Every structure is written in C-alpha cells, then in structure tokens.
C-alpha cells in the first residue's frame, strides 16, 4: 500500500464507531478531576527540547531513544512532547500560577509522542490523562492523587487491577544508595548492555528501569532504595501508607518500582491491570519535589500521574466494562418530492432545537434507499412525508423496533417522541425498580 494510504507506524485513527468510547472515558476523567478540585490545562503539543532534557533526564530511555526532535525553520530545537508533566511545569512557572492560591491542581488530556517499537498497548502517538498538584508536601497529597486514579478506574468499571507503591527517596537518601548501586552493578559490568554501562557512573538508578532481559535480571538482585531512606522520607512513606489504608485503598509495596523518568522523588506508584498480558501498567506517577526548582521556578513540592488512554480502553474491552451505546438517530424523515423535502428540513430544525437527533434526506434519492439508510443507522422512528401528509398536516410515526405506527399531527411530533422514547423508558425503569 502506498504511504499516502497508510497512517504512520505506531499511530491509530479513532474511527467514528469508536469515538463515543473516547468521549465517554474523557468525560469521566474530567468529571473525576473536577470533583477532586482539578481544572483542565491545555498546552502545546511541542516544546523547546530543553523542557524535556532538563526534566525527564538525559540518561532516560525517553530522552536517549524515544523523542521526536527536529530543528524548525528558525533553527530552534523543538520536541513533540513525550509526556505532559514537563510542559505543565513550564507553563505554571511562565504564567506565575505558583504565586496564586496553593495547592494548585491541574489536569490534562493530550497526545504524547515516543519513538518506540510499536506493539499492542505501545504506540508512537498515544494519549494520556493526567493530573498535577503543586504546593502540597504532606502525605495526604500523595494519597489524594492516588485516590483520584483509583476513583476513576472504579467509575469506569475496572475490576482487575492492583496498586503498587514505593518510595525512591530524596537526593539526600540517594547519595548512599547510588554508591551501593554502583558497587553492585560494577561487579556485573561485563553483562550490562551498552546503554546501562554508560549510565553506571552518571545515573545508576536508570539501570533498574532497563527493558533488556539481561539487565532486568541483574536489576532484580540490586539493593533496594527503601533500605536507604532518610528519616524524613521514611516518615513520609509511612504517612502515605496510613492515609491509603484509612481510605480503604488496597496497595502493595513494590521496592522495584523506580519509574522511567528522572524527576521523581519519594512516592512513586503504578496501577497495573491483570486483564492484559504485556503493557499492563495503565497509570504511573509520583512525587517530583525538585522539578519546579530545576526548571527555574520557586522551590515547590509537586506530584501527579499519567494514565494511558489507549491502554485503559484495551483493559475496558478485555473486562467488557460497560460503555454507553453509540447514539442512533431518534427520528428519520423520508420526504417524497420537493415540497415534502422542504417541510422535513423544517421539522428537523425544530426537533434538533429540542435536542433530538433528527435526520432527513440530503441526497435526493428514492424512498426505498432512504428507508434502508434509516434502518442501517438504527433510527428509532421514521416518518414518510408526501403530498397527502402535507395536505392533512399529519403523518404516521413508525416505531422501527416494534413496527407500531402512531398517527400524529406534524406540529406534535416532538411531544409524541418525548412520550414514546422517555415515558415508556421511565415506566420500564420504574417497573424494574419495583421488581
Ligand atoms: P512503560 O514502562 O510501559 O514504557 P512508562 O513508564 O514509559 O511506561 P509513563 O511515562 O509513566 O510510562 O506514562 C504513563 C502511562 O502512559 C503508562 O502507564 C502507559 O499507560 C502510558 N504509556 C506510556 N508509553 C506508552 C506508549 N508508548 N503507548 C501507549 N501508552 C503508553
Ligand atoms: Mg516507556
């Protein structure tokens, strides 16, 4: 197939029959964020490259291997965002939002770009929902951010997932920990991959997140950072655990979680689904107390998470989570002749103003083809309008499911539809409730 007929590798089109799922999931995301006090922020898809090299870290896989970076026509180095946290931090500093009321709570939905090897649940363009909370250093903030993710997954009907948490400490704890890691990995340096060998001196913790099977096996036996936490970080972690327990959120401590981005400090966490094989991490996040200062802002504690929307939808599919049905037309008007077509157009206009999905013919084709189309779209009701109907100002409203016909005045179609669609549904719902 020619390139022009094929989407770039690792990208997906969301087709009309699937977009209702995206709209549903995104509306639940924004709604959940709203009830926790987070407001949406919308950012550019590209940033100056330094925004990511300075934050995500230049020894991470994301920066070393996965970024879409190019020079624009003005010779600036530009990068398509591989994640949104760095851009959020850039923006809240730029617009002085950190001098407003604290904590500042924002959320986002947007595309991310990473040059990865495409496979199920791993794309080159994917989408994340995420939240960021600035100016709260207490363990209650970590618990709240985790609770939001948990609330959302439950709202969306997910059942088979688990929460894994860890603390990777602060720069203070890292001093001793890095020394211990270097010693351990040096003893295995003959077996590490080339990238990890380079990381050994500069950032040994990155080796813990290497995806190569040999490195991961070596990493599994490495010292764990939990054993090196300073008093403050240990106390903070205990606080997070108490808050989660008090809120009835199940979790397990997994000392091997380090996350793929350099900016994390203290708490890190992942929500992992058991409904998928590989690529089962649906949400990852943590605290990044040093990042705002690192990006030239006032020192500000902060934390958040990113949730992969494609992976979430895959899990919802696998678990057959309930999704709203694709909306079908409430009514289709089939005109016969020019005068009827004008009338149908006017009837549609009035019904649309009342919020009905009302359609009519815009092709000029015959009645049979029109009815076939209405049937394919799953129209709930149809009305055929010809000269007789125009003369009597009334028509037959046909219920496409039951085949029942109702004679109705053309001025009364809206109220008849309300009666038939909503009153019947309400009666059925009430009867179910009583049962
Ligand atoms: P992984 O370990 O799977 O590579 P990550 O640690 O790189 O994930 P983050 O940068 O923390 O992931 O992004 C948060 C979430 O975004 C992930 O948990 C996942 O759901 C989603 N995600 C990350 N990379 C991809 C991708 N290439 N394709 C689809 N979703 C992704
Ligand atoms: Mg990754």
Image (cartoon, helix red, strand yellow):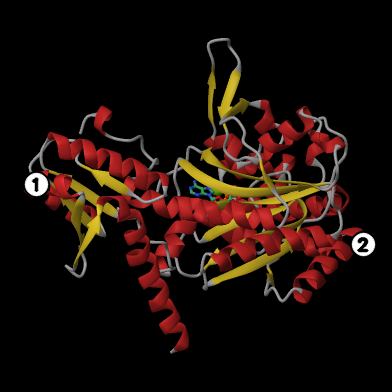
What residue is disc 1 on?
367
Q: Secondary structure at mark 1?
A: helix
Q: Residue at x 72, y 76 (%)?
A: 248
The residue singled out by tag 2 in the image is 231
Camera-side residue of 270 and 343: 343
Foreground mark, 1 or 2, reads 1
Instruction: Point out residue 415 in the picture as x, y percentages from the top left corner.
Output: 36, 58
Near mark 1 (Cα within 10 A), the count class, few <14, some 14-19 or many ≥20, is some
- Viewed as shown, does residue 263 lie left or right of 349? right
Give percent across and percent down for residue 21: 42, 55
Instruction: Answer left or right for 89 relative to 169.
Output: left
- Is tag 1's residue or tag 2's residue first in the polypeptide sequence? 2
Asked if the beta carbon under badge 1 is closer than 8 A to the nearest atom of ligand 1, the reply is no
**Residue positioned 27% across, 27% down in the render:** 4
Query: Depth check: 396 or 14 in front?
Result: 396
Q: Residue at x 33, y 45 (%)?
A: 15
Above or below, 162 against 364 in this view is: below
- Taking the image as shown, residue 8 lies to the left or right of residue 68, namely left
Crowd rating for badge 2 (residues with CA inside 10 Å; few <14, some 14–19, many 20+): few
């Amino acid at each position: 197939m020619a390139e022009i007929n094929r989407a770039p590798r690792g990208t997906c089109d969301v087709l009309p029959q699937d977009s209702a799922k995206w709209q549903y999931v995104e509306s639940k995301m924004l709604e959940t964020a709203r009830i926790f006090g987070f407001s949406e922020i919308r950012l550019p898809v590209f940033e100056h490259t330094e925004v990511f090299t300075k934050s995500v870290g230049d020894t991470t896989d994301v920066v070393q291997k996965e970024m879409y970076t190019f020079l624009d026509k003005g010779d600036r180095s530009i990068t398509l965002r591989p994640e949104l946290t760095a851009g959020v931090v850039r923006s809240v500093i730029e617009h002085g939002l950190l001098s407003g009321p604290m904590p500042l709570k924002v959320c986002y939905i947007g595309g991310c770009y990473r040059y990865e090897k495409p496979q199920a649940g791993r794309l080159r363009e994917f989408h994340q929902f995420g939240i960021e909370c600035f100016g709260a250093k207490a363990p209650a903030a970590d618990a709240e951010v985790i609770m939001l993710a948990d609330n959302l997954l439950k709202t969306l009907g997910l059942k088979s997932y688990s929460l894994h948490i860890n603390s990777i400490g602060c720069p203070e704890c890292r001093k001793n920990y890095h020394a211990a890691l270097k010693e351990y990995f040096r003893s295995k340096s003959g077996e590490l991959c080339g990238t990890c060998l380079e990381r050994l001196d500069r950032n040994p913790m990155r080796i813990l997140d290497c995806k190569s099977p040999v490195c991961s096996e070596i990493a599994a036996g490495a010292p764990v950072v939990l054993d090196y936490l300073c008093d403050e970080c240990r106390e903070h972690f205990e606080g997070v655990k108490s808050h989660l327990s008090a809120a009835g959120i199940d979790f397990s401590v997994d000392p091997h979680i380090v996350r793929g981005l350099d900016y994390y400090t203290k708490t890190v966490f992942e929500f992992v689904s058991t409904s998928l094989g590989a690529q089962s991490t649906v949400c990852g996040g943590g605290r990044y107390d040093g990042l705002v200062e690192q990006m030239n802002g006032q020192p500000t504690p902060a934390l958040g998470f990113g949730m992969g929307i494609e992976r979430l939808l895959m899990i919802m599919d696998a678990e057959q989570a309930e999704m709203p049905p694709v909306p079908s037309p409430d009514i289709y008007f089939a005109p016969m002749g020019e005068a009827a077509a004008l009338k149908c157009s006017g009837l549609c206009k009035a019904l649309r103003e009342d919020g009905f999905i009302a359609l009519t013919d815009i092709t000029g084709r015959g009645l049979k083809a029109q009815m076939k189309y209405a049937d394919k779209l799953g129209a709930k009701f149809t009305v055929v309008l010809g000269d007789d109907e125009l003369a009597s100002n009334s028509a037959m409203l046909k219920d496409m499911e039951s085949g029942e016909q109702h004679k109705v005045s053309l001025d009364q179609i809206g109220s008849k539809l309300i009666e038939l669609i909503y009153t019947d549904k309400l009666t059925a719902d009430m009867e179910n409730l009583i049962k």
